[in-house]
Amino acid sequence: MLKITSALDLKDLVTFIPNKHEPIHNWYHYKEGYSKQFVELMLKKFNIQKNQTVLDPFCGVGTTPLTCKQNGIKSIGFDVSPLAAFVSRVKTADYDLTELNKTCRNVLMEKFQRPEHLPRDEWLRKVFNRYVLEDIMFYKEKIFQIQDEKIMHFMLLGLMDSAMECSYAYKDGALIRIQKKHVPPLKKYFKYKIKKMLKDLEKANVPNTECKIELGDARDLAVCDNGVDFIITSPPYLNKIEYTKIYRTEYALFFEQPKTQVRSFIEEGEDAYFRDMRKCLENFKRVCKGPMAIVIGGGCFPDHVTLVDEKIGEIAEDIGLKVKEILVARNSWCTKARTVKVGQIRESVVILE
């Protein structure tokens, strides 16, 4: 029988909310992530040492690898999303602060020139007013001229986050909504953002610790057998969010859409999701020598709920892993038509070894 324990002290830690106040972690808001504090709790729980390596096969915007780096611990992160992998690389990179400051200052001092052409993408024309879009394209062109790739990506992340703060779009659960409103001038916000990011780096003094971020699929990890000591991660939740749609503005401006993803959405069905999760867990077992912490949420459907943590535990034991415990961080109601309660779902941390 699976050991299921209430752990409501993790309620906020398994969300991205605490990261809003964490330098570097808050360079780009990614509400599907968990917090720096959660990772630090797992590092302490597993007694992870500086000569060991932590893997996050669904690294998102880099909370696990960045927290490991800040604690002097080696890490590897994979994500199938070009956007997520990009953000993770920027946040975990080592910078020459003198050269970074100089280049940023030069770009920010460039005299504005109206771009000859704006994107024809109708979505972008809905999301931004003309002046903001002109500023984005002007700075994007200047940033792409920077020779140092790390510095170019640093400024590009600042521009991406600034663009979203100056847009009419906001992420509402699994949807993007358009709300026409007053938005700050992009140029002014971008300068503020870059200066804040530079200040974060100057104050942080992050150790120069090995950290590798790659595009990769958790169902087929490019890691050698027993190549890592621990796993701290969070796969996509069952029937929760189609990431490539919720971040469509960023993709339209800066990235190509990823070609593969874990099938977590209702159109694919639960069976497809759990087949994918079995492949992931088989890979985790192959590459990892020690404990694993997996943050996962329940599935909410019009006629039933699925306790994903228990199902993950059953799959794990079926392939030869041991479920040490399931820590229930939060409970919530699954409802139909916003009023009819279908059942309770929970968000949990599954501890495997």
Image: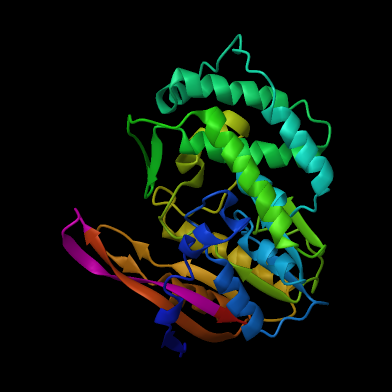
Q: Does 55 sit above or below residue 7?
A: above
Q: Is residue 257 visible?
A: no
Magenta-span inclusion, residue 295: no
Q: Measuring from the top left, give residue 345's x and y in whole percent.
A: 33, 70
Q: Residue at x 49, y 64 (%)?
A: 18
Q: Residue at x 61, y 59 (%)?
A: 58
Main SS of the magenta segment?
strand
Would you identify the image quadrant in which residue 321 lies?
Answer: bottom right
Magenta-span inclusion, residue 343: yes
Q: Does 93 sit above or below residue 65?
A: above
Q: Is residue 315 left or right of residue 150?
A: left
Q: Is residue 295 left or right of residue 332?
A: right
Furthest-left residue in view? 339
Q: Residues in magenta?
A: 336-350
Q: Measuring from the top left, give residue 209's x and y in whole percent.
A: 81, 65
Q: Is residue 152 left or right of residue 297?
A: right
- Name the image quarter holding the C terminus: bottom right
Q: Measuring from the top left, give residue 254's x and y in whole percent.
A: 62, 32
